[in-house]
């Protein structure tokens, strides 16, 4: 089996032709840049996993666009993929204008940087909603732990049908101080007391043994969110420990093992959070998304799935991981393979 697609050059981020081949039990991408020569990368170690994945697809079900609402953060995580401070941040009207072709069919999900430290965060959300954009926010939860901030989220701009429109980013506690962990715990306690549920809790993992913590966390907090997302991280995470990349098939197997008492099964409902993902449902009703972010080495430009869009720094929307890789290229000075002189 061979799939013809497009990818990006590992060096200059130019869009180039690529082939995905199934060989030696693995799924491999081969591509050649006219200027930088041939590249080969593993897409997946488990051939059965990928053929199943390609068969299912998730075409045509996306309804979310992520925008980077702020280009600064109140945490300094060494693995963060976002080129902090690089991107121009706009007023609500800019997003309304540049995304007008999606209006009516799409929600906006504010990301960053950390959107909640945007000085005009509440006004920005209100303005987007007044312009006709249903809006949610991805947050590191630090501000949510503050009384004043949390109280300001207790209204119809942020709560719909008992759902608090925040996607909460947790990590394994080894990644931050006790002070930060306590602030995140406070945020969860506030949600619990408010009787609402956050949209989801998200973990980006560097190693599969972090699932032990996630299992324990889940046991204590599952009533405070409607979904859990676990994803393996981008190259800059994978390289931290010598490039030990976790493939989605590895995460899938480890998750089923760790949550075996809740009998997770693959759900035929679509999942839209990433290019390589599986959607699971457990016996207690919780939905779980497992995903693996591709890198510039193995990104498939035309994958059959159609995950959440992201507005990239070139003012265009792409599927999430592709947008992040394009931003990565732009932050290195490349746009469509050409050296930028003086920015966009
Ligand atoms: Zn190249």
Image: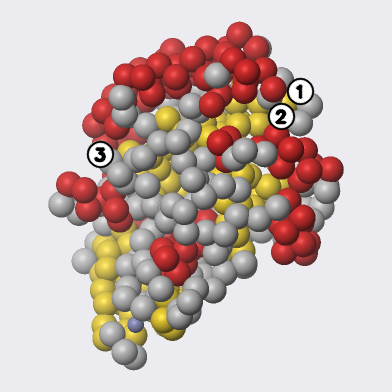
Viewer-proximal residue, 222 or 45?
A: 222
At 56% from the left and 47% from the top, the residue drawn is 70
Task: Say which residue appears at 59% left-offset and 40% top-offset.
Answer: 118
Where is residue 19 drawn, in percent x and y? 37, 78
Q: Disc 3 designates what residue?
A: 207
User: Camera-side residue: 198 or 69?
Assistant: 69
Nearer the observer: mark 3 or 2; the answer is: 2
Q: To which residue does mark 1 refer?
A: 155
Labels 1 & 2 near each other (Cβ < 8 A): yes
Above or below — where is 53 with respect to 19?
Answer: above
Asked which secondary structure carries label 3, the reply is loop
**Classed neighbour count for the residue bearing mark 2: other residues with Cα under 10 Å, few (<14), some (14–19), many (≥20):** many
Q: Quadrant of ligand 1?
A: bottom left
Answer with left or right where residue 315 lies relative to residue 158.
Answer: left
- In the picture, the quarter occupied by the C terminus is bottom right
Q: Nearer the viewer, mark 1 or mark 3?
A: 1
Badge 3: residue crowd in 10 Å (few <14, some 14–19, many ≥20): some
Extreme residue in the bottom direction: 34
Note whether residue 184 is visible: yes
Q: Quadrant of residue 57?
A: bottom right
The residue depicted at 52 percent of the width and 19 percent of the height is: 145
CA–CA distance in space, label 1 to label 2: 6 Å
Q: Earlier in the sequence, mark 3 or mark 2?
A: 2
Q: Is mark 1 within 8 Å of ligand 1?
A: no
Q: Mark 1: few, some, or many residues within 10 Å (few <14, many ≥20)?
A: few
Residue 39 horizontal side relative to residue 300, left or right: left
Disc 2 Cβ-to-ligand 1 distance below 8 Å? no
List x then y, in percent, for residue 160.
Answer: 75, 27
314 vs 242, left or right, is: right
Disc number at residue 163?
Answer: none
């Amino acid at each position: 089996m061979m799939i013809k697609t497009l990818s990006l050059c590992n060096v200059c981020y130019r869009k180039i032709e690529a082939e995905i081949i199934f060989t030696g039990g693995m799924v491999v991408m081969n591509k050649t840049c006219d200027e930088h020569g041939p590249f080969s990368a593993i897409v997946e170690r488990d051939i059965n996993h990928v053929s199943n994945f390609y068969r299912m697809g998730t075409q045509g079900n996306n309804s979310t666009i992520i925008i980077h609402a702020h280009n600064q953060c109140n945490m300094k995580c060494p693995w963060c993929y976002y080129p902090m401070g690089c991107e121009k941040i706009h007023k609500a009207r800019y997003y309304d204008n540049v995304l007008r072709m999606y209006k009516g069919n799409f929600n906006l999900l504010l990301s960053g940087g950390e959107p909640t430290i945007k000085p005009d965060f509440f006004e920005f959300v209100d303005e987007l909603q007044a312009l006709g954009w249903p809006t949610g926010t991805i947050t590191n939860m630090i501000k949510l732990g503050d009384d004043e901030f949390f109280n300001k989220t207790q209204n119809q701009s942020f709560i719909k049908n008992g759902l608090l429109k925040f996607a909460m980013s947790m990590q394994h506690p080894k990644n931050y101080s006790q002070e930060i962990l306590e602030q995140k715990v406070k945020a969860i306690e506030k949600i619990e007391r408010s009787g609402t549920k956050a949209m989801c809790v998200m973990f980006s993992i560097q190693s599969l043994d972090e699932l032990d913590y996630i299992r324990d966390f889940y046991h204590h907090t599952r009533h405070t969110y409607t979904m859990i997302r676990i994803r393996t991280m981008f190259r800059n995470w994978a390289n931290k420990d010598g490039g030990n990349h976790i493939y989605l098939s590895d995460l899938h197997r480890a998750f089923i093992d760790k949550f075996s008492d809740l009998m997770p099964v693959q759900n035929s409902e679509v999942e839209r959070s990433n290019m390589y993902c599986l959607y699971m449902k457990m016996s207690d009703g919780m939905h779980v998304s497992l995903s693996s972010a591709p890198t510039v080495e193995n990104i498939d430009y035309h994958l059959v799935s159609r995950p959440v869009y992201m507005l990239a720094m070139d003012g265009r929307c792409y599927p999430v991981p592709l947008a992040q890789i394009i931003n990565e290229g732009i932050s290195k000075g490349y746009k469509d393979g050409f050296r930028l002189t003086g920015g966009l």
